Image (cartoon, grey):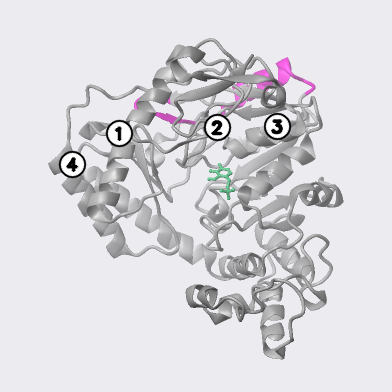
């Protein structure tokens, strides 16, 4: 990384220059620097609406960058050790989908763990690729899916030598990493692309004590959520490419679905955040690591909670662990994670990232302060004292091997009927069912609905998980193939 060059932020600099010029706007957006919408100015401030502008010559165009956006992308590539970087304004969903659509044509096979984010399976609906799922193994005590074992991926490759890509989460929402380097090498040895979902891994690029990043492992593409640990505005993301990828083709793929009116708020936030990470990322993430480790020690000292960390590393399904992730297993106090999530919010005014059936996840980042960590620890101690229950009625998470009977695309586009949830056992689902976050599908289009899946959905609903996917708002019905 060239530290001198990294001091630049070309989009931000161009916007500043543009602001000083006081150009008269006869172009969109129609609020005209906020003058047409005073309430918006009241909400966002003059500076913000003043740079909410459209593409124009001095500001370049995200659909075909030739000047300041191109330079910002080059700087991002340099900062992340990539051959090419694309600024993305449709969330990491758009980065994940662009990776999959670049790798796969209709009918192509892609090897992926079943605990992928819905954006990956949605990409299969879009392009008609066929999933070959790897059982990610589940820690049944913690109720979390783990990483892919290299031997399982090798077996999948032997059974499916015609697959075109391997897709890896690095890390998972809970911080679990697979042996990324071996998986990338395995993919390349079989002429397959290695695609990495790094929605939860931006920081891996900026502190050497953290697990290996996608680009450092030699992956072909990586989808990086700058808006998560990178500090940029919500919805901004990066798509990174290695040297073996045709960036021109990737650009064509991105432009299939990308807006022609990319937000300069999002793009300048990517530019500034990249500069910030390049200049100060190492120290910032050292602080984040210290805070997360401190929180883990304090929470484990309360008793009955288990804030898991790098002691879980086992050389296989937990090859490495991202210690910035603060997940806490709550089964020891007889409450589901979602119940603890609700208590933290309703009784203690603490908003955490999510609660699932066995865990909560508190997101620790460059914006946190130690006094806030103390508040979280104090609230968890209080919850244990006041709300603990016998642990008898908790659900034990098992990996339910999906029975895939149709590709996601076939199922999505075939004739369907809606049935009450309890009557769908044995039928093939045509939509997603998931708790969000984390957004990992319980069911994806094309999979058989089993009685145990129905039990799981009903339990999650009863415990107050925020569920998404089906057309039926309260998930009382599911669409199935006729
Ligand atoms: C693993 C994973 N991939 C992709 C995404 C999509 O990111 P975004 O919400 O920015 O579209 C998420 C979102 O949480 C995620 O958890």
Label 3 or label 2, whichever lies nearer to me, is: 2
- Identify the mark at residue 432; answer none if there is no mark: none
Q: Nearer the viewer, residue 63 or 270?
A: 63
In the rendered image, which quarter is residue 54 located in? bottom right
Q: Residue furthest bottom?
A: 21
Q: Is residue 480 above or below residue 33?
A: above
Q: Residue furthest left?
A: 385
- Identify the mark at residue 384; answer none if there is no mark: 4
Instruction: For ligand 1, tell me if the residue under mark 2 lies within 8 Å.
Output: no
Q: Is residue 295 magenta?
A: no
Pick whichever of labels 3 and 2 is earlier in the sequence: 3
- Identify the mark at residue 471; answer none if there is no mark: 2
Which percent across, then down, holds residue 293?
A: 35, 51
Which percent across, then down, holds residue 132?
A: 67, 22
Residue at screen point 38% across, 36% down: 465
Q: Nearer the viewer, residue 196 or 127?
A: 127
Pick whichever of labels 1 and 3 is earlier in the sequence: 3
Disc 3 to disc 2, C-alpha distance: 19 Å
Which residue is the site of mark 3? 124
**SS for callout 3:** helix
Q: Which residues are magenta?
A: 139-162
């Amino acid at each position: 990384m060239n530290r001198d060059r990294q001091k630049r932020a070309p989009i931000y600099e161009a916007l500043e220059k543009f602001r000083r010029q006081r150009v008269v706007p006869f172009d969109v957006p129609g609020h005209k620097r906020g003058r047409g919408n005073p309430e918006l100015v009241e909400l966002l401030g003059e500076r913000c609406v003043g740079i909410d502008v459209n593409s124009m010559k001095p500001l370049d165009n995200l659909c075909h960058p030739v000047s300041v956006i191109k330079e910002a992308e080059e700087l991002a590539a340099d900062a992340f050790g990539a051959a090419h970087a694309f600024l993305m304004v449709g969330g990491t969903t758009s980065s994940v989908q662009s990776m999959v659509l670049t790798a796969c044509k209709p009918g192509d096979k892609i090897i992926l763990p079943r605990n992928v984010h819905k954006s990956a399976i949605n990409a299969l609906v879009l392009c008609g690729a066929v999933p070959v799922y790897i059982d990610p193994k589940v820690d049944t005590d913690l109720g979390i899916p783990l990483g892919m074992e290299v031997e399982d991926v090798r077996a999948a490759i032997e059974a499916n030598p015609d697959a075109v890509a391997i897709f890896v989460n690095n890390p998972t929402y809970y911080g679990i990493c697979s042996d990324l380097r071996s998986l990338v090498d395995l993919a390349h040895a079989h002429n397959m692309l290695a695609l990495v979902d790094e929605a939860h891994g931006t920081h891996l690029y900026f502190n050497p004590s953290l697990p290996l990043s996608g680009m450092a492992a030699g992956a072909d593409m990586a989808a990086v959520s700058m808006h998560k640990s990178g500090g940029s505005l919500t919805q901004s993301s990066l798509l990174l490419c290695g040297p073996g990828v045709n960036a021109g083709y990737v650009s064509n793929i991105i432009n299939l679905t990308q807006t022609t009116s990319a937000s300069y708020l999002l793009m300048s936030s990517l530019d500034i955040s990249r500069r910030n990470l390049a200049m100060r990322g190492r120290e910032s993430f050292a602080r984040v690591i210290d805070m997360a480790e401190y929180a883990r020690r304090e929470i484990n000292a309360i008793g009955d909670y288990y804030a898991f960390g790098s002691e879980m590393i086992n050389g296989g399904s937990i090859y490495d662990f991202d210690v910035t992730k603060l997940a806490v297993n709550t089964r020891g106090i007889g409450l589901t994670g979602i119940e603890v999530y609700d208590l933290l919010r309703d009784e203690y005014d603490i908003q955490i990232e999510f609660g699932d059936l066995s865990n909560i996840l508190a997101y620790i980042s460059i914006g946190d302060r130690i006094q806030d960590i103390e508040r979280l620890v104090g609230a968890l101690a209080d919850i244990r004292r006041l709300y603990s229950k016998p642990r008898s009625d908790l659900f034990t998470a098992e990996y339910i091997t999906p029975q895939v009977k149709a590709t996601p695309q076939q199922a999505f586009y075939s004739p369907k009927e809606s049935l009450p949830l309890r009557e769908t056992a044995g039928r093939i689902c045509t939509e997603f069912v998931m708790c969000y976050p984390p957004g990992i599908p319980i069911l994806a289009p094309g999979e058989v609905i089993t009685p145990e899946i129905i039990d799981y959905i009903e339990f999650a609903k009863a415990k107050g998980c925020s569920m998404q996917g089906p057309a039926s708002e309260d998930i009382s019905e599911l669409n199935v193939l006729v």
